[in-house]
Each structure stands twice: as structure tokens, then as C-alpha cells.
């Protein structure tokens, strides 16, 4: 302030060289210093609390509580105390012999088993595994990538002490840089000798190999114990579903458990299975013609003319919904049994499900238990939908598959791993005989029920040795259905599994 000669006070502002008021600039500087100081103080306080927790955790409990009261979380956000992630295992130190790319073929559980096998092959040959590619060309035409179904980071981190896994090969091995990857399908049911003697030398020449088919490319038996256990570790620990799938899967399980015990029925009476197997029992002539046309539309399904009834009598067809209803009743399940159908769209829809619903009114599907909005993100992604059914099947009180496909086998093995949870493995050949005898009046209902129960006394998922058939790996027990090497330790295996169950076929 200045005083003029006439006594009036006049406010005068000083300007800097840029023409801006010096006072305004000074205020801005003060404000900036205060903000920075506040940030530094809060940072220091947080650091102090963190360090203090290491030395005097009880002393700082009240302080952290006060901080939480001062800075509450936004409304609508639920805060759950999450345990800290386990420390990363030390990475295995080895010189990689090359990069292994794999394209898994088939449905979710066929691809799941293949991924486990390919990790074991990469470990055996000291390779770097590229995150697997999933099948997008099968009947289901699911566009899902690995990261859409499985937790990629967990997959890579949890196996780092065994195998180096990368998301993609280095750029120098890309086609646009003139590199041509060598593609091949490894021989099915191969042992370690095949991979060491015939596959490993190829990496010295090509550096990158692409296995374009991976189903059943590693033998069930005759594999070293460390590789068998690694297959289990991948299957039961490393292959976690994405948080989105897990969250919805756990919600499904909670809803079902709140309603009481439940049976997961893998009713494999879907269009693709019927077309592939040639099984048309119970179908109309138009439906049978439709299924046959579908089978011949896919080159890898085409085979000689199939006689449906012959296959059925051999036990090679999935049970129909009507047959399933009778079998469940014979096994002792009543109208109050809660049944979750773990399957896709049943062929013939409500018409074919009528008998099953009449016998068991408490039948549910995921579409009946969840809001359509919750399932929307999984629509047109059959593998992601199958992942939900997989989670429910693992958690169920009883699991019953009506066909021994890949899901049935992988779920069976997983339930064995979780403590031999009850899994009723239907003897379809014997059941078809009994069903026909009952329906033609030869067996009364009581005789039929007693015979069905007797046929399954030892088919409830109890501990047992995996059946080995020399030179016929397709006919012996599947590793993932009964991974006995991972279910017990040392001499306890003999006590748990009983005597050897190997057989030699001449």
C-alpha cells in the first residue's frame, strides 16, 4: 500500500518480468509446498507403519485402525482380507534346448490333459514352453484363448521351478522375419524314450517345434515318477481358472450347497457326442438322419457306417435321459435328490428330459441358478461354460457321468485326488442288458434295482490301482482318471491301492 499526496491509500501490485503478479505467484508456491509436504508426511507415515509392523505389530494396531477411519474405502466396495501371495519359487536354472509351441485340440478337458502332458515333455527335454494355443476349429468353435480360461500368470509362476514358460517366442522366430516353424504331431501314447531319441534332436536343427496335435501324446504308464507327479501338479495346482470363472463357479457351488447335498450328473446326451458316436437310441428317424449328416460333415469324425444298436449293446453309447432316470432310481436316489446337470444343450431338449424331470423334480442347470447377465460374458464360449460345470462337478457330493469321455475321466481323477470323493462309474454294457431285461418284463423292478446296485459296489471311485494293458494304451485306464502316483506315498500305496492290477493281452 502507498499513500498519495492527498492522503488516499492506493494498493500497488508488483509485477515480475513476465507480467504476472508476484503475490499470486507467491501464493501458488506456498500452496504447492503445502501439497508436497502433505504427500511427504503421509508417505513417511505409511512407511513408518510398515516398518513398525515388522518390529512392534501390536503397538501399531491402533494407528492403522485410526488411519482406516480417517480414509474410508468408497461406498459399495467390499474389502476382504486377502492373504499375501506366496513367495515365488526360485526359477530352475537350465540351458534351454529350444522353444516348444503346442496347439491343443478338442474340448476343455481334452486340452487340459494335453497341457499337463506338454509341460512334462518340456521338462523332460529342457525346453522353453510357449503358453499353449487352444482349439478354435472344433465342433464347438470356441474363440477362447488360454488367458480367457486359465490364469496365465499363475500358470507361469507356479511352474517356474520346473519349466520356463513364455507368452510368445522371440521376434527372431516370427514368420515375418523369414523364420519357418517346423510343425508336426508327436506319436500318440509315446514314452520318454521317443521324446529323448526322436524329438530332442529336432530342436538342434529347428530351435522351435510346433506340436499341432497334443491329445494323448504321452503314455499312461512307464513314465518316471517325477514326470507323473509333475503332470498332477500342473493339473491340480497350476491350471487355475480365471478370477471371473472361479468367482461365478464358487457362487454356483454356494447356491447348490445352501439347498442341501447335490449330485452332479454329466448327462452327455448332446448333439456332438451323438453324432460322433453314431448313437441314436430313442431318437426319431429325422433326428437320426440329422446326426448322421452332422457326423459326415466333419472329416475327422467320418468312419464306416455305424449301427447304433450294436454300439449300444457294446456299452459304447451314452445313456439316454430316460435310461438315466431308471438307473438313478435303481441306485436309490429319490424325488428329493437335488441334481445339477453338468452338460450343454441336451439333444431333443425338454421332450427328452421329461422322464428325468418327472422322476427328479429338483433338477437344475446353471442357467436356472444364475442371472442371465452373469452368464452373458460366457455365452458362445463353450469351454468357459464347461469350466463352470467342471467346478460344480468337483465340488458335488456325488458325481455321475453317463459316458466316459474326457470330462468324466478328468473329474474322476480330480475327485480321487481330493480324497476319493464319491464318483459312480456306470457300467454301461451291463446296464443296457439290465434295462432291456426289465423293460421286456423279464426282471421285476426289485430284481432290476438289486442287480444295478450289485454291479456298482466297486465302481464308486474307491482307491484302486490303474489298470495296465501291455501294448494297448487306448484300452487301459487313463492316467488322469486315476493318477495313482499322486494319491499316496511310498509303502502306503500298497496298503491304499491293493495288489497290482496289470494285465497282458496277447
Image (cartoon, grey):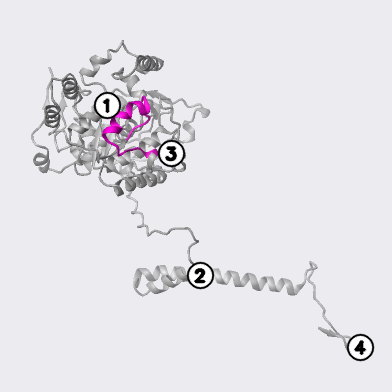
Residue 494 position, x and y percent, is 9, 39
Q: Earlier in the sequence, mark 3 or mark 4?
A: 4
In three-dimensional space, the C-alpha distance between marks 1 and 4, rounded to whole angstroms, equals 112 Å
Residue 233 position, x and y percent, is 27, 41
Residue 470 position, x and y percent, is 16, 23
Q: Secondary structure at mark 2?
A: helix
Q: Earlier in the sequence, mark 1 or mark 2?
A: 2
- Determine if residue 81 is in view: yes
Going by the picture, which residue comes out furthest to the right? 6
Range shown magenta? 342-367
For disc 3, the marked residue is 148
Residue 30 position, x and y percent, is 65, 73
For disc 4, the marked residue is 6
Which sits in the foreground, 247 or 202?
Answer: 247
- Determine if residue 124 is in view: no
In three-dimensional space, the C-alpha distance between marks 3 and 4, rounded to whole angstroms, equals 83 Å
In three-dimensional space, the C-alpha distance between marks 3 and 2, rounded to whole angstroms, equals 39 Å
Q: Residues within 10 Å of mark 1 (few under 14, many from 20)?
A: some
Q: Earlier in the sequence, mark 1 or mark 4?
A: 4
Q: Quadrant of residue 343?
A: top left
Q: Residues within 10 Å of mark 4 (few under 14, many from 20)?
A: few
Q: Check if residue 344 falls in the magenta segment.
A: yes
Q: Quadrant of residue 461?
A: top left
For disc 1, the marked residue is 322
Residue 448: mark in rendering: none
In three-dimensional space, the C-alpha distance between marks 3 and 1, rounded to whole angstroms, equals 36 Å
For disc 2, the marked residue is 42
Amino acid at each position: 500500500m502507498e499513500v498519495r499526496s492527498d492522503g488516499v491509500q492506493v494498493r500497488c501490485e508488483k509485477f515480475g518480468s513476465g507480467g504476472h503478479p508476484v503475490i499470486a505467484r507467491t501464493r501458488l508456491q506456498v500452496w504447492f509446498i503445502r501439497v508436497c509436504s502433505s504427500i511427504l508426511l503421509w508417505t513417511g507415515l505409511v512407511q513408518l507403519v510398515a516398518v513398525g509392523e515388522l518390529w512392534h505389530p501390536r503397538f501399531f494396531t491402533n494407528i492403522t485402525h485410526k488411519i482406516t477411519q480417517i480414509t474410508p474405502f468408497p461406498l459399495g466396495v467390499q474389502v476382504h482380507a486377502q492373504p499375501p501371495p506366496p513367495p515365488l519359487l526360485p526359477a530352475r536354472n537350465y540351458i534351454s534346448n529350444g522353444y516348444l509351441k503346442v496347439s491343443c485340440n478338442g474340448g476343455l478337458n481334452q486340452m487340459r490333459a494335453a497341457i499337463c502332458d506338454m509341460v512334462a515333455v518340456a521338462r523332460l527335454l529342457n525346453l522353453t514352453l510357449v503358453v499353449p494355443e487352444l482349439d478354435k476349429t472344433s465342433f464347438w468353435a470356441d474363440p477362447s484363448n488360454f488367458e480367457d480360461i486359465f490364469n496365465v500368470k499363475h500358470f507361469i509362476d507356479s511352474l517356474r521351478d520346473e519349466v520356463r514358460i513364455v507368452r510368445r517366442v522371440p521376434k527372431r522366430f516370427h514368420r515375418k522375419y523369414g523364420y519357418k516353424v517346423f510343425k508336426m504331431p508327436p506319436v500318440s501314447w509315446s514314452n520318454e524314450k521317443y521324446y529323448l531319441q526322436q524329438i530332442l534332436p529336432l530342436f538342434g536343427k529347428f530351435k522351435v517345434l510346433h506340436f499341432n496335435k497334443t491329445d494323448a501324446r504321452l503314455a499312461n504308464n512307464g513314465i518316471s515318477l517325477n514326470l507323473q507327479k509333475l503332470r498332477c501338479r500342473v493339473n491340480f495346482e497350476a491350471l487355475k481358472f480365471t478370477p471371473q470363472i472361479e468367482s461365478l463357479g464358487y457362487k454356483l457351488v454356494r447356491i447348490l450347497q445352501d439347498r442341501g447335498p447335490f449330485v452332479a450328473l454329466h448327462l452327455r446326451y448332446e448333439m456332438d457326442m451323438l453324432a460322433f458316436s453314431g448313437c441314436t437310441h430313442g431318437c426319431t428317424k429325422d433326428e437320426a438322419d440329422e446326426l448322421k449328416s452332422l457326423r459326415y460333415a466333419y472329416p475327422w469324425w467320418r468312419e464306416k457306417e455305424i449301427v447304433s444298436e450294436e454300439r449300444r449293446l457294446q456299452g459304447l453309447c451314452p445313456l439316454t435321459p430316460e435310461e438315466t432316470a431308471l438307473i438313478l432310481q435303481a441306485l436309490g436316489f429319490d424325488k428329493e435328490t437335488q441334481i445339477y446337470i453338468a452338460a450343454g444343450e441336451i439333444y431333443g431338449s425338454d421332450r427328452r428330459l421329461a422322464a428325468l424331470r418327472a422322476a427328479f423334480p429338483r433338477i437344475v442347470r446353471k442357467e436356472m441358478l444364475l442371472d442371465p447377465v452373469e452368464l452373458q460374458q460366457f455365452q458362445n464360449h463353450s469351454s468357459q461354460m464347461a469350466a463352470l460345470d467342471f467346478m460344480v462337478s468337483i465340488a458335488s457330493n456325488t458325481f455321475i457321468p453317463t459316458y466316459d469321455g474326457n470330462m468324466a475321466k478328468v473329474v474322476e481323477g480330480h475327485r480321487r485326488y481330493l480324497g476319493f470323493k464319491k464318483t459312480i462309474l456306470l457300467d454301461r454294457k451291463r446296464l443296457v442288458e439290465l434295462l432291456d431285461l426289465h423293460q421286456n418284463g423279464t426282471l421285476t423292478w426289485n430284481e432290476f434295482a438289486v442287480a444295478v446296485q450289485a454291479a456298482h459296489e466297486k465302481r464308486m471311485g474307491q482307491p484302486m490301482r490303474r489298470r495296465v494293458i501291455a501294448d494297448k494304451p487306448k484300452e487301459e485306464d487313463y492316467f488322469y482318471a486315476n493318477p495313482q502316483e499322486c494319491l499316496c506315498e511310498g509303502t502306503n500305496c500298497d496298503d491304499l491301492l491293493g495288489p497290482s492290477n496289470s494285465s497282458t493281452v496277447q
